[in-house]
Amino acid sequence: MPFTHLFLSHAYVVLFVWVFLEQVGVPVPSAPLLLTAGTLTATHRLSLLPVLLSVLCGSLVSDVSWYFLGKRYGTTVVRLLCRLSPERDTCVQRTGDYFGKHGAAALLVSKFLPALNTMAGAIAGQTGMDFRLFLLFDTGGVLLWALAFVVGGRFFGDLLKHNPHALAWFAHFAILLFLLLLLGFVASRIARRRRSLAEIRTDRLRPEELHAMLARKQPLYLVDLRHPLDYLPDPRTLPGAVVMTPDRLVELGDTIPRDRDVVLFCTCPNEETAVHMALTIRKMGVSRVRPLLGGFDGWKQRGYPLVPIPGSVPGAGAQLVGAAEVR
């Protein structure tokens, strides 16, 4: 196939660029490509050492760049990477805790952990890890990761050698098989995201439960995510709620308390905005977050207490920042 010959003639450059892009944060999984490259080393269409060097260089260029960016800009860079991370359920808090517990040794396994893969360099820089120590452990981690997949592919290629027809077929259709592997990885990530969304929808808080929690004066962080136009017919909100747009909630991610339940509500069908924002802030390490079933309308229909939104909608934003800091 023309694509196979094109790949083979530029394989090492493709490996370097592909791995670099994944480590920068582009959602292009490298594992299928490494498995394919490993299998092609068994056919002697590629050489094992240049494959490993291409992967190592592609990853180190990205990791070292993130290290110095993390050292210079700290939390800002880590939050950016968290938003780019393909893993939607874990991010800043869990990765930071992992580094705090294991130190530089975390770099040896970081490439195998989706939550740490891209972020490891930035977190190492943010925590002030010595650059030589970082480079040593990061190089070891990249080599372990590359060897695991490349040698795995090589083992598959060695098995194919027992069937010359199968080996020739693979060499001819290697790119097609790579694309199938890539689609499989993408499909698995989409499936994980859908499971996370389904979990959050199942975990929605009923208005009766929230009313009882407020009656018990249980510490809560309520966030009204409605669009400003939704306030016009009824400029009220739930008692103690802060009013902010989804973008503003992300900007204030560091002020969201981690020691209490966070309840999000809106007026959209099936609480879509609240559900997706719950998934978003879980990436920031906020694990105790639940959308309100039925949203603002469900609460209002039950006749539960409502309070006026303080000031005008635009002016409320400054008050909300202060409220978030107080909480």
Image (cartoon, rainbow, N blue to C red):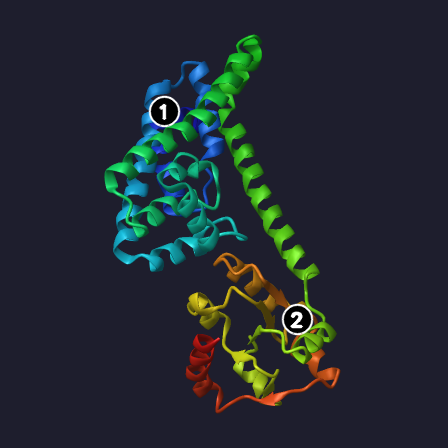
In the picture shown, does residue 135 fall above or below 77?
Answer: above
Choose between 155 and 12: the one closer to the eye: 155
**Residue at left 52%, top 34%?**
179
Q: How many marks?
A: 2
Q: Which mark is residue 51?
A: 1
Q: Which mark is residue 267?
A: none
Choose between 320 and 162: the one closer to the eye: 320
In the picture shown, does residue 62 fall above or below 315?
Answer: above
* CA distance separating discs 1 and 2: 51 Å
- x and y, in percent, of residue 240 in the image: 57, 82
- x and y, in percent, of residue 103 in the image: 37, 42
Choose the circle earlier in sequence order: 1 or 2: 1
**Residue at left 67%, top 77%?**
216
The kind of residue on which mark 2 rests is Leu
- x and y, in percent, of residue 241 in the image: 56, 80
**Residue at left 55%, top 39%?**
185
